Amino acid sequence: MEVTLDRLLGRPVLARNGRRVGRVEEFRVRREGGGWIVDGYVLGGAGLLTRLNMGARLILGLRARGYVARWDQLQIDPDGKLQLTCVVGDLERV
């Protein structure tokens, strides 16, 4: 499936039980052939903080939690709804 990433950034992600897990804050990608493949989606405040440099985080004392969902752990519906295909406990913690 091809999706433009700007349509996913900031969108909420729901767990299988309908509870909100966090928003898509960052993408983990790799180059393959002539294109880019999304390996994972960083969810929650931790993704937002990774965009800040280390100095700003240390000065401000910011810490946040979040998750990384692999490409196969996130279902993207045609209407733009994002839902996990696994339980939250299976996600990588950040």
Image (tube, rainbow, N blue to C red):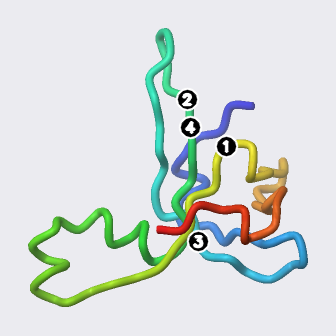
Q: Position of residue 21 (x, y in %)?
A: 68, 77
Mark 3 element type: strand
Q: Which residue is mark 3?
A: 23
Q: Are marks 3 and 1 in contact (CB under 8 Å)?
A: no
Any mark on residue 37, and which?
2
Q: CA distance from mark 2 to mark 3?
A: 20 Å
Amino acid type of the residue tagged 1 in the rendering: Trp
Q: Are marks 2 and 1 in contact (CB under 8 Å)?
A: yes
Q: Which residue is mark 4?
A: 38
Q: Residue at x 19, y 78 (%)?
A: 57
Q: Position of residue 26 (x, y in %)?
A: 46, 57
Mark 2 element type: strand
Q: Position of residue 67 (x, y in %)?
A: 56, 67
Q: Are marks 2 and 4 in contact (CB under 8 Å)?
A: yes
Amino acid type of the residue tagged 3 in the rendering: Arg
Q: Are marks 4 and 1 in contact (CB under 8 Å)?
A: yes
Q: CA distance from mark 3 to mark 4?
A: 16 Å
Circle nearer the N terminus (2, 3)? 3
Circle nearer the N terminus (2, 1)? 2
Circle nearer the N terminus (4, 1)? 4
Q: CA distance from mark 2 to mark 4?
A: 4 Å
Quadrant in which the N terminus appears: top right
Vertical arrangement, residue 12 with respect to residue 8, above or below: below
Q: Residue at x 56, y 37 (%)?
A: 38
Q: CA distance from mark 3 to mark 1?
A: 15 Å
Circle nearer the N terminus (3, 4)? 3
Residue 85: name its quadrant.
bottom right
Q: Residue at x 80, y 51 (%)?
A: 75
Q: CA distance from mark 2 to mark 1?
A: 9 Å
Q: Position of residue 15 (x, y in %)?
A: 80, 72
Vertical arrangement, residue 47 with respect to residue 85, above or below: below
